[in-house]
Amino acid sequence: MNKGRSSRAAALAAAARARHCLYESPVIFQDPFALKFTSLTLRRIVVTKPLRWLVFDRLLRALRPVGAQIVARSRYAEDVLEPAIAAGVRTVRHRRRGIGASILR
């Protein structure tokens, strides 16, 4: 990962969330920023039907459960963080397992 740039894993996770928000039903996690957090290449793949079909439905078909896991983990994180923030928690240490990035907010 280069300083000042997101990792490829983060960009792929954002692409999975964007694809879910735009094209899957029911939507279990609404992420209005997901498409903006992907790379230009991934953004084009997500919004272009033939490319989306080729990449997600053909080439990466075996990874589809991973995309579902990303969306489910995002939903869980939001469900846990929202009441904590409402209760006044301002600092959250969040560790993403599998990606290996720790952030302190």
Image (spheres, helix red, strand yellow):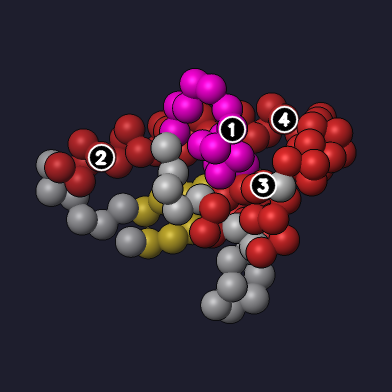
> Do the CB atoms of the residues marked 3 and 4 lie less than 8 Å apart?
no
Q: Residue 65 lies in what quarter of the image?
A: top right
Which of the labelled discs sits on residue 3, or is there none? none
Instruction: Work out how far the residue at label 3 is from the one at label 2, CA to CA, in angstroms.
Output: 28 Å
Instruction: Work out how far the residue at label 2 is from the one at label 1, CA to CA, in angstroms.
Output: 25 Å
- Residue 67's spot in the image, x, y percent? 64, 35
In the rendered image, which residue does mark 3 sit on?
46
Q: Earlier in the sequence, mark 3 or mark 2?
A: 3
Q: Nearer the viewer, mark 1 or mark 4?
A: 1
Kindly identify the residue that appears in the image at 30 percent across and 41 percent down.
Answer: 81
Q: Earlier in the sequence, mark 3 or mark 1?
A: 1
Q: Nearer the viewer, mark 3 or mark 4?
A: 3
Q: State the quadrant of the N terminus.
A: bottom right
* Vertical arrangement, residue 21 with respect to residue 46, above or below: above
Q: Identify the element where label 4 is drawn.
A: helix
Q: Identify the element where label 2 is drawn.
A: helix
Q: Earlier in the sequence, mark 3 or mark 4?
A: 3
- Residue 46's spot in the image, x, y percent? 67, 47
Kindly identify the residue that appears in the image at 79 percent across and 46 percent down.
Answer: 51
In this view of the protein, can residue 100 be seen by the observer? Answer: no
Q: Is residue 22 magenta?
A: yes
In the rendered image, which residue does mark 1 sit on?
23
Instruction: Work out how far the residue at label 3 is from the one at label 4, CA to CA, in angstroms.
Output: 14 Å
Instruction: Work out how far the residue at label 2 is from the one at label 4, CA to CA, in angstroms.
Output: 27 Å
Q: Amino acid at mark 4?
A: Arg
In the rendered image, which residue does mark 2 sit on?
82
In the rendered image, which residue does mark 4 sit on?
64
Depth check: give the residue in front, 24 or 93. 24
Instruction: Work out how far the residue at label 3 is from the one at label 1, CA to CA, in angstroms.
Output: 9 Å
Q: Amino acid at mark 3?
A: Val
Q: In the image, 19: left or right of 21?
A: right
